[in-house]
Amino acid sequence: MAAATLVVSLVMSGLTFWAVNSIQQDSRLNDTRFGSDLGLLLSANVAPLIAEDNRAELARFSHRFYSSTSSIRYMLYADEVGDIFFGIPFSESEVQNSLTIRRRIQLPENFAEHVDLPMVRQHLTPDGEVTDVFVPLVYEGKYLGVLAIGTNPNPTVVTSSHLTRDVTIAVFVSIWVMVILGAVFNALTITKPIKELLLGVKNISAGDFKQRIDLPLGGELGELIFSFNEMAERLESYEEQNIEELTAEKAKLETLVSTIADGAILLDPNLQIVLANPIAQGIFGWEGKKVVGNNVLHYLPADVTSELTRSLYQVAQGELREAEYRITLTEPTNRTVRILLTTVLDSSRETAKGIAITVQDITREVELNEAKSQFISNVSHELRTPLFNIKSFIETLYEYGEELGEAERREFLETANRETDRLTRLVNDVLDLSRLESCRIYHFDAIDLVQPVEQTLRTYQLNARDKGIELIQEIEPNLPSVLGHYDLLLQVFANLVGNALKFTEPGGKVSLRAYVVNGEKHRQNLDPALSDAMLQHPAKVRIEVCDTGIGIDSEDQAAIFDRFFRVENRVHTLEGTGLGLSIVKNIIEKHHSKVNLISEVGAGTTFWFDLAVFQDGAMLKPERPVEVAPSALALSQDESVVAQSVESPEITAAVNKTPEAVSIP
């Protein structure tokens, strides 16, 4: 706006000054013509007087002419050599005194040759511009001198040009004064509010919805400011609502992510951690570390970093949508994980906004697969051996039956029968174990332990007598009923007693005892520090199966309950399926308890577990069993093997090799 005003004002001023200059040029030309004509007229009248040397008449005529003509500034008369001899408004007689000043007009050398043409010039004096006219004085062809007349310019033209010039300058100055005042007014009333509005809009775009403009303005600008403030208030209200909704949704999402069983990590496109749920933090050992906002590659274990770095960058750059890895971690703990990388896309499903990492701990799955493979391998091996033996003996009987004697055929048939029994036992044990490991629900009821104990001992009585092993039953009088499953407990007793007979040498002893642990009844026999802790748990019945057999080596005790693990795998003396103790372990766990063992090679073994006492209306619930270890065994082949219970102080005398231990977790 200022530039346009400057250009317009300069153009208009230039045009105005050009017009004034043109007028002045025309005025000068007119003044020149007027002076020239006036000089020629005057010279024609005074030439005769100068030729006659009638200076008095010349003076009178010149005075009359000077007085009658207002435009004449001066009149000078000079002789042939240029000396001034008369002049108006001054003359030689008037200025002559003791110091006579002689003046002359300096004319061009060839001035006398052009007597027919006056010489005209213009010059500027302190009183204004003057037109000088030099007219040669010629009379009868004789050059007498020169007449110099000075004329004033046309006063009307001068006044008009000066007025035009002054008006133009005034207009120019006024325009710029108006421009300056307008700029100041604009800065005070328009520019400042507009700058405030611009700053407010920038703050709004930056998310500061608390921005307000407080300027006391009216008109359209005031309405604009009012509308801006109203818009900011609404945006602030919407923001608060959105923040509340987003906060609620974020809380729901974080709660959901934190409760899922798999680890979840969310990354932004720069691989910065946005979210990591507790499962992922536990898998990678991030507890107590501030990993959110940092690069995930700085915190992943070295095994994972080497596998995922390339894929993470490919997913972040959109070159890869998803990837899956199975990695075995060595830090912070040994485990196997499955890691899934998935691209998080925007609403248009085109631009990658982040990366979702799902971490699944498949350690148990891998172990189960390995156990499954081992189980199938063991079952195949165990089934193949008796089947091969049965097939071999039957083929031999089929092909060479007539050549064999009666005793040989009977021996072959007995061997095939034993292998068939062995095969049947194996299949039954596998079915039992499979049924126990399934989700089948068993109904528990009150069980009097005397019945399954006596039934088990009657079953193995003949076997024990044949091997010369003494079976001992030690049941506490008035033993309360326990909560359990009769058939399953009978199978436990059968497996434990059968194993004890199998690994006990002739002359040994196998004891099956049951007694109550915990409860007010037994506080008097316990250390006072332990009695109060034991009363916090309901009474239980402990069952122990003790033998004086070959014992179990410490390195075998950790694996004794694994499927198909057999002590004879190391000693190579006895046969078995290796599933009996696995079945026992599963049955006891079904009763929400735990089977324990104490053993010493060459001295004997004791298996023991606790069962909850039956209470009317009580349901069996999972609870951590209170473990009160049985007394140490008297591991001597010349002495009976007994397990010292809490309420049997009379047996303590037989136990000397290992101190009594009672532990409550």
Image (cartoon, rainbow, N blue to C red):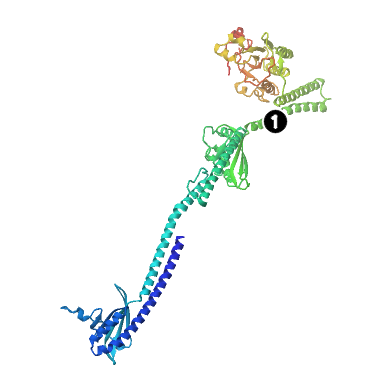
Residue 40: percent from the left, percent from the top? 32, 85
Left or right: where does residue 81 sit relative to residue 579? left
Residue 479: percent from the left, percent from the top? 68, 10
Element marked by disc 1: helix
**Neighbours of disc 1 within 10 Å: few (<14), some (14-19), many (20+):** few
- Say whether residue 654 is visible: no
Left or right: where does residue 124 sit relative to residue 407? left
Rendered-image quadrant of the C terminus: top right
- Say whether residue 611 is visible: yes
Front-most of 220 and 201? 220
- Residue projecting furthest to the bottom: 140
The residue indicated by pointer 1 is: 377
Q: Exactly how many numbered labels are in the figure?
A: 1
**What residue lies at 78% left-to-right and 21% top-to-bottom?**
414
In the rendered view, would you say 158 is above or below 357?
below
Residue 222: percent from the left, percent from the top? 51, 49
**What residue lies at 20% left-to-right and 79% top-to-bottom?**
94
Task: Tell me which amino acid carries mark 1.
Answer: Ser
